[in-house]
Amino acid sequence: MKFRSYIRLFAGVLLVTVSTSAIAQSYLENPKYGPDEETRKECAKNLSLYGTFYKHNNYKDAYKPWQNVIRICPAASINTYIRGVRLLKARYEEVADPAQKKALVDSLMMIYDLRITHFNKKGMVLGQKAEDLFTLAPDRYEEAFNIAKEAISIEKANSNPSTLFAYVSIAKVMYDNQKLTADQVIELYSQVSDYIDAQATANPNDDKAKQAKDGIDAIFAGMGVANCDNIIALFEPRFKATPEDVNLCKKIRSLMSANRCTSHPLYLNASIQIFKSEPNADLALDIARLQYEAKNAREAEKYYNEAINLESAVEKRANIYYELALLTFTELKNLPKAREIALKAIEENPNMGKAYKLIGDIYASERNCGSNDFEKKTVYWAAVDKYIKAKQVDPELTDAMDNLINTYSQYYPSKEDIFFYDLKVGDSYTVGCWINERTTVRDRK
């Protein structure tokens, strides 16, 4: 054992001697390695010695000369701090005594502070410091929280995804221990989610950002703080004060959507403000649907048309036309216009069975098409024609259309009525008024 120690020491001294002599001049002339020549020589020796051990993963023997570097020439190299974190963590894992572990955590915190002093990058380094403190000394969560908060206040959207994740993780512990209120947690999540969303959007292939985002959302959802009442109480006064703040509106929309608060007027109003600044088809469609649900038919019509004008995808346009036709039929009660819009949906997508079904419903609802009872009943021929067409283009509608056909065929004119009007089953017939559809005479069974 003594022989092995001797050989190891000899090898180390030899390496130091060779390395030091090779680079002595550059060290001796640079004040970052110490205030005087003697200190710089000592610094060079310890840098070389700990560096050699470190490269061979011999952290135990690297530890003492690394400490000497920190003590006599702390500005010598940023690697002293990067490697020092690993050395301290390795030593932390090796010891069992709680007092020793605590001292090593304190040393690690000091190393981060020294790195900031000599090499800056304060925000990024504070983020790492907070992560390590929370991991190694979770009972110091409040201290870790404040460090992470400062780090993120500096780095903002450039914060490391792991720091953002750690911040929310610590916030959960803070909330569980009544150090944060529900409103504070919502505010914190709103800020962090903006930052991580921006990173995930800017770098869609960045797995770290995506994983952090998923983790942050999961932690927040599990905390149960974001109920609708809390969100509205926190953000409605802010919205009223600055409704033109698009970023605020986006926060409101994101939080309310995630927590199923979309029926509240605040969600709709925030969405409208975003649309004013950043119009797009999807948002216009969402607003149209919200207005429809709120029974604001004219406003819904307006935003459906906005969505149609902004949408370039054919199938999406067809669906928007269909929804607008449905609104025009059910809320605006304009049957001719509803049919006109439904036909535009079919132009975009000829296989849209539900649009044919809607036209059938429109016809079947018409009660004033004709000057007598016979003519009024002929609208059911036209309606059934559309139901037949609907199941032809979309077989999945077959059962539903068959039910409607059976229902409305009971309202056909009787055979006697047909004979009275000098017609017979199978004849061609044009349904009158605005419908003006060519159809086939059928009798009630």
Image (spheres, rainbow, N blue to C red):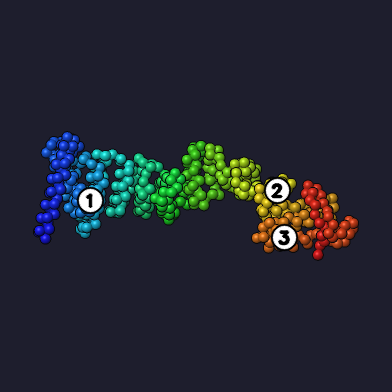
Relative to the observer, which residue lies in front, 94 or 13?
13
Give the x, y percent position of residue 382: 77, 54
Q: Earlier in the sequence, mark 3 or mark 1?
A: 1
Look at discs 3 and 1 and give the one toward the viewer.
1
Which disc, if any, is residue 407?
none
Relative to the observer, which residue lies in front, 329 or 263?
329
Which disc, if any, is residue 343?
2
Amino acid of disc 3: Leu
Q: Earlier in the sequence, mark 2 or mark 1?
A: 1
Q: Is residue 170 left or right of residue 79?
A: right
Which disc, if any, is residue 55?
1
Q: Which quadrant, please, contains the C terminus?
A: bottom right
Disc 3 secondary structure class: helix
Instruction: Quadrant for residue 155, please give it.
Output: top left
Q: CA distance from mark 2 to mark 1?
A: 74 Å
Look at discs 2 and 1 and give the one toward the viewer.
1
Relative to the observer, which residue lies in front, 373 or 155?
155
Q: Residues within 10 Å of mark 2 (few under 14, many from 20)?
A: many
Disc 2 secondary structure class: helix
Give the x, y percent position of residue 387: 72, 57
Disc 1 secondary structure class: helix
Residue labelled with disc 3: 404
Amino acid of disc 1: Lys
Q: Residue at x 17, y 34 (%)?
A: 29
Q: Is residue 170 left or right of residue 50?
A: right
Q: CA distance from mark 3 to mark 1?
A: 80 Å
